[in-house]
Image (spheres, rainbow, N blue to C red):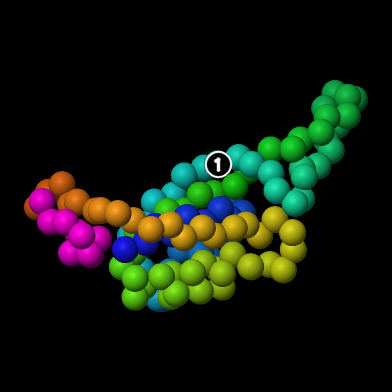
Amino acid sequence: MKLVIAYIQPHKLNEVKQELYRSEIYKISVTNAMGCGQQKGFHESYRGVDIEVNLLKKVRIEIAVNDSFVKPTVDAIIRGARTGEIGDGKIFILPLEECIRIRTGETGSEAIG
C-alpha cells in the first residue's frame, strides 16, 4: 500500500480528477495549500506599494492506493496537471503501513478498496 501525495495548481484540479476517474481511481482527498518552489513567487502592487508574494496557492491531493494502482495514479495526475511550465507541482509516494476502514473494521488492502 502507498500514499500518493501531489501538489498541483488549483486550476488543474478538475482535469486531474477527470484523468483519475478515467484510470478508475475514485477515492481522493483534496486540501487547499500554500507554498513556493522553483517559481519563487511574484511581485504585486497593493495601493502603490510593491509586495513580494512568495507563497502561492496550491492544491494537495492525497490518494491511498494498493501497489498495483501506484503507476496508473501517478500517470493520471501527470496527464491532468502538466502544462510544461515551472510550478506544475510535485508528486510524493510514501509507504503506507496500515489502513483501517472504521465502518467494517477491515484492514490492509481490503480497507483501501
Secondary structure of residue under mark 1: strand
Q: Is 56 on the left-hand or right-hand side of 46?
A: left
> Where residue 88 appears, x then y in whole percent?
66, 60
> Where residue 102 appears, x then y in whole percent?
15, 47
| Residue under pointer 1 | 33
Question: Looking at the picture, does residue 89 appear above or below residue 43?
Answer: below
Q: Residue at x 18, y 52 (%)?
A: 101
Q: Residue at x 56, y 69 (%)?
A: 78
Q: Is 53 on the left-hand or right-hand side of 11?
A: right
How busy is the neighbourhood of tag 1: few (under 14 within 10 Å), some, or many (20 plus)? Answer: some
> Where residue 44 appears, x then y in whole percent?
83, 35
Location of the N terminus (image quadrant): bottom left
Q: Quadrant of residue 79?
A: bottom right
Q: Residue at x 64, y 41 (%)?
A: 35
Region rendered in magenta: 105-113
Magenta stretch holds residue 28 = no
